[in-house]
Image: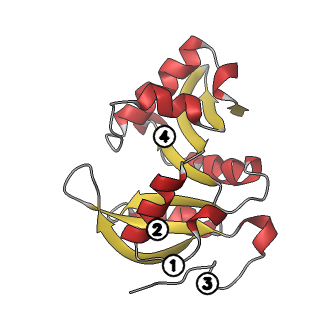
Amino acid sequence: MITCKKPVECSAHELQCFKDLVLGGNEVEPEGLDDRIFAAEFLLLLEKDGNIKGVAAVKNPNDHYKNDVFTKAHVSENAEGYRFELGWVFVDSSARGNGYSHNLVEKSIFVGNGQPIFATCRNGNQPMHNVLMKHGFRKCGMEYPSNRGNHRLVLFLHPGAQRGAAVDGGCRRHN
């Protein structure tokens, strides 16, 4: 079962479980994470057998961050047209292989209320790339260096219901 809540609606236990799982993925800078969690539009909590086994967030990124991501990826699409960012999708290793990441991504798109949404993902995380693309996201632009670790990131854009299902998902590269 997936529960979707505003961060202020979450219990202290739910927030701690969310944070622990996000940090367990080792893809996020821990500094300031609490503030970023509370700034999210929605937190999604996947519960199995009474325990939170998966999480995702529909985040409210600021314009500076969005512009930085789109610029680094060399995408000329208007970053301001993307109100939400899908992020922190993580399923505990004990619950993997059951399609839960698909459920979390699908529900995240739904709660985004038809708004265009973007996501970033490590270039080597092909299983997550496949999940995103299966749910209408398209790879856009070029891979770019992460600020965290020695890897590269890929930008994915989802057109949302308001933009229709354009073949390229609104992806345009700039040089």
**Residue at position x 56%, y 41% in the image:** 56
Q: Quadrant of residue 154?
A: bottom left
- Mark 1 to mark 4: distance in Å? 32 Å
Q: Which residue is mark 4?
A: 91
Q: Is residue 93 left or right of residue 172?
A: left
- Mark 3 to mark 1: distance in Å? 13 Å
Residue 168 is tagged as 3
Q: Is residue 32 left or right of residue 14?
A: left
**Of the two numbered discs 4 and 3 in the rendering, the one whose residue sits closer to the viewer:** 3
Residue 103 visible in image: yes
Q: What amino acid is found at the position of numbered circle 2 in the picture? A: Phe
**Of the two numbered discs 3 and 1 in the rendering, the one whose residue sits closer to the viewer:** 1
Residue 70 is tagged as 2
**Residue at position x 63%, y 79% in the image:** 170
Q: Earlier in the sequence, mark 3 or mark 1?
A: 1
- Mark 4 to mark 3: distance in Å? 29 Å
Q: Are marks 2 and 1 in contact (CB under 8 Å)?
A: yes
Q: What amino acid is found at the position of numbered circle 1 in the picture? A: Ser
Q: What amino acid is found at the position of numbered circle 4 in the picture? A: Val
Q: Earlier in the sequence, mark 2 or mark 1?
A: 2
Please, what secondary structure does the residue beneath circle 1 have?
loop
